[in-house]
Amino acid sequence: MDNFNFYSPTEFVFGKGRENECGRYVKKFGGTKVLIHFGGKSAEKSGLLGRVRASLDAENIPYCELGGVQPNPRDTLVYKGIELARAEKVDFILAVGGGSVIDSAKAIAVGVPYDGDFWDFYSGTQIKEALPVATVLTIAAAGSEGSPNSVITKEDGLIKRGTGSDLIRPRFSVMDPELTQTLPAYQTACGATDIMAHVFERYFTNTPEVEITDRLCEAVLCTMVKEVPRVIADPNNYEARANIMWAGTVAHNNIVGVGREQDWNSHGIEHELSALYDCAHGAGLAVIMPAWMEFVYKHNVMRFCQMATRVFGCAMDFENPEATAVAGIKAFRTFLHNIGMPINFAELGAKEEDIPLLVKKFGVGTGRTGGFVKLSAEDVTSIYKLAAKAAL
Ligand code: NZQ
Ligand code: ZN
C-alpha cells in the first residue's frame, strides 16, 4: 500500500427531511449572505427550493439566487455567478442540485476572490482561496458533494476540464434520498454508471497488497449491482435510494481509493464525448468504460477475474482465466444495457467520424494518461473505435 493522507472534512447531513436544516448548517459554518445556485426546473417543481429558502429565512440569513445551470455546466454562467456574488457581497454558496450545479458553485467560489479569469484554475493554476461551498444533493452520481473536484465546460471550443482543491470540498452536504425519487429512470441509471465508474477508476491499479480498498471497492460495486435494478423497477424505493446515495459519496470521496495508484483514463476519454455531444456523463461512461476494459484487460488478467467473480458472480475458469476476465466485462456491459444505458456510439448519439477530433481534444501527450495502463493516441483511438461498435 502506498503512503497517503485522507482528508474529507465535509459534514454529511443524511436522511429524510434534512434539507429543512440548511439554514442552521449555513450558520454553523459562518455564512451570513448566501448565493443559492440551482439548475433547471426540477428543484423548484419538487418544492425543494421553497424549503431551502424557508430554512434560511428561519435563521434570518439573507440570500440571492442564480438558477439555470445546465448539465455539463458552462463557464458563461460561472462568470455571471461571480459577478452576482461580488455585487451582493455573498460569503457562502449553497448549491441545490446535482453534480453540474455543485461544480458550477465551486467554480464561482474560486472565481469570486480571484483577480484573474477563473478558468486559470481549470488550466493548471493552483487554487489558493475560495468562498465556502455547501450542497443539497438531488441526484446520486458525480460525488461532487464530497469531492474536492469541479468540472466545467468552456463554451468557446467546447473544452471540458476539471480542477481540484480541498478548499472547494463542501463544508456540509445535505443528502435526503427522498429528493432523488423524482429523477427519471434514465438519469438514475446515468448516475449509477458514474458511481460504478468512480470505483473502477480506483479498482484497476498496479499497487499490490491493497486488500482493504479492494474489498471496499467491491462492496460499493456489489451494492450498485443489487440496488440499481430495484430503483429502476420502483423509483420510490427509499431504502434502495438511500444505499445508492451513500454509495455515490464513498465512491468518490476517495475512501475506497487511498494508498493505491488510480487510472482515470475512462473519465478523460468520456469527457470529450459529453463536451462534444452534450450527452450525460454517465451515459458516455457506459459506452467508454467497458471498451476501455476490453482494451486493457490483458495488462492484469487476474485483476479482471477478481472483478468478474466477486462483483458479477462469474465462475472462475482456471484453465482459461482470460475467458473469465472477458465474461466479467460482458456482464458489466449487459448490466448497463439492462438499466437502460447506451452501449455504443449509435445509442449515445456519437459519430465514428469524429474520433480523430475526440482524440485530438483528449490531448494525449499533455499529461492526461492513466495510471493503470498508459495510453498513446493510437490506443485512445482504438478505445473509441471499440466503443463505437460495441454490442452485447
Ligand atoms: O437542472 P435540473 O432541472 O435540476 O435537472 C437535472 C439535470 O437535467 C436533473 N435532476 C437532478 N436532480 C433531479 C433531477 N431531475 C429530477 N429530480 C431530481 N431530484 O438531472 C439532470 C442531470 O443533472 P447533473 O447535475 O448534470 O447530473 P450529475 O450529478 O450526474 O452531474 C454531472 C456533471 O458532473 C461532472 C460531470 O462531468 C458532469 O458535468 N462530474 C463531476 C465530478 C466531481 N465534481 O467530482 C466527478 C464526475 O466524474 C463528473 O465528471
Ligand atoms: Zn464521473
Image (tube, rainbow, N blue to C red):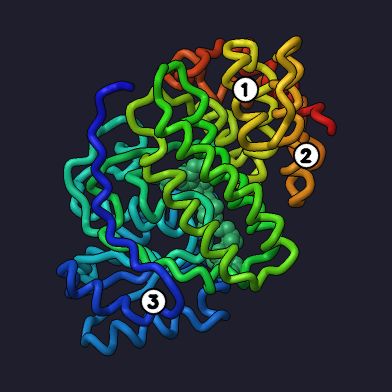
Kind of residue at disc 3 = Arg
* Residue at which label 1 appears: 304
Q: Label 3, secondary structure: give it.
A: helix
Whether the residues at callouts 1 and 3 have beta carbons within 8 Å, the answer is: no
Mark 2 Cβ inside 8 Å of ligand 2: no
Q: Which of marks 1 and 2 is in front?
A: 1
Q: Is residue 382 left or right of residue 203?
A: right
Q: In this view, does 84 lie to the left or right of 212?
A: left
- Report if residue 152 is visible in the image: no
Q: In this view, does 206 lie to the left or right of 232?
A: left
Marks 2 and 3, how far apart at CA: 36 Å
Q: Residue 35 appears at what percent x and percent y?
A: 31, 70
| Front-most of residues 386 and 125 | 386
* Residue at which label 3 appears: 18
| Front-most of residues 389 and 140 | 140
Relative to 355, does residue 87 appear above or below in the rendering?
below
Which of the 4 image quarters holds residue 315? top right
* Residue at which label 2 appears: 334
- Report if residue 201 is visible in the image: yes
